[in-house]
Amino acid sequence: MSTSPHTSLFNTTYPIIMAPMFLISNAAMVKAALDHGITGAIPALNYRTDEEFRTAIDEIRAHTDKAFGINLIVNKSNVKYKKQLQTCIEKRVDFIITSLGSPEECINAAKPLGIKVFCDVIDLKYALKVQALGADAVIAVNAEAGGHCGNMSGKDLIPMLVEALDIPVISAGGVSESADVKKALALGAAAVSVGTVFIASDESPVSSDYKQALVDYSAKDIVLTTKMSGSHLTVINTPYVQSIGTEASWLERLMKRNKWLKKYIKMFIALRGMKAIENAANKATYKTVWVAGPSIEGVHSIDPVGAIADRLTSDL
């Protein structure tokens, strides 16, 4: 795989990024991923303070010189964004993945220092915009992705972006085994971003109940909800999710009718929803809102990150 396009992006043995997962990704997971020939990224928001964030970067750097990345939420709802970007620049992280907003400021700050910037996209229109801004690659988030997903299948989205763009396309969504990686590469992707299957890992910090849910449930149990963040989010259809429903709340209906209030209501919904997800992820609670994608179909046990990475790369 040494001649594949991913080597110019993050220089790993295999074309796989362990996706940055809110509340889940941590330094231990990234170190294990790097030890097994793939790369990984962590959301900066997984750390409550800048000191904790810097310590995590330093811990990975002390373990290896291999490339890893940080995910930044670049819209106004992330009040920590400016400081997080500054820390990424000062620490010279290898790459930044931007989500939910314009990456222009991030690209302008990072690229002169050789820090690559990959931008989450769900359609061609936005992909063309970030390419024009100077993105090094796009991460094509398809309808099979866990968490916030796109609305197009990978088999439709990847070829469309590959044909239209001059920068690499990284596919995100629907990968649970090496055959899925090969399918994405055959469609023209330079690499894949894989999240859900790594939730059920020894190094993952979430509760044992959450991990076991990925083993016990299957793809047919994944549903879309807008209750948690105001945007489509894929979650496991637990009894609690069934009881609260997945349709728009009165707040969301108000948000759609009132453009002036939209930003503030969406921020409130997101903060409330993410707190509920955090509680469910980290402790026993009947309010089980567990984020996952349909690739849980390929999760049959709880294993070390390294073993999961080895399965993903076994036939590459």
Image: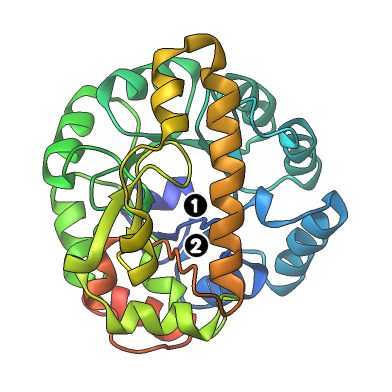
Q: Residues within 10 Å of mark 2 (few under 14, many from 20)?
A: many
Disc 1 residue type (three-letter):
Phe
Q: Which residue is mark 1?
A: 10
Disc 2 residue type (three-letter):
Thr
Q: Residue 180, how many percent across, how many down? A: 19, 64
Residue located at (54% from left, 36% from top): 117
Q: What's the coloring here?
A: rainbow
129 relative position to 29: left or right: left
161 relative position to 283: left or right: left
231 relative position to 123: left or right: right
Q: Nearer the viewer, mark 1 or mark 2?
A: 2
Q: Quadrant of residue 295?
A: bottom left
Q: Residue 163, how many percent across, how many down? A: 17, 28
Q: Which residue is mark 2?
A: 39
**Could you tell which of marks 1 and 2 lies nearer the N-terminus?**
1
- Report the number of discs: 2
Q: Which mark is residue 191?
A: none
Q: Quadrant of residue 230?
A: top left
* Labels 1 and 2 touching (C-beta < 8 A): yes
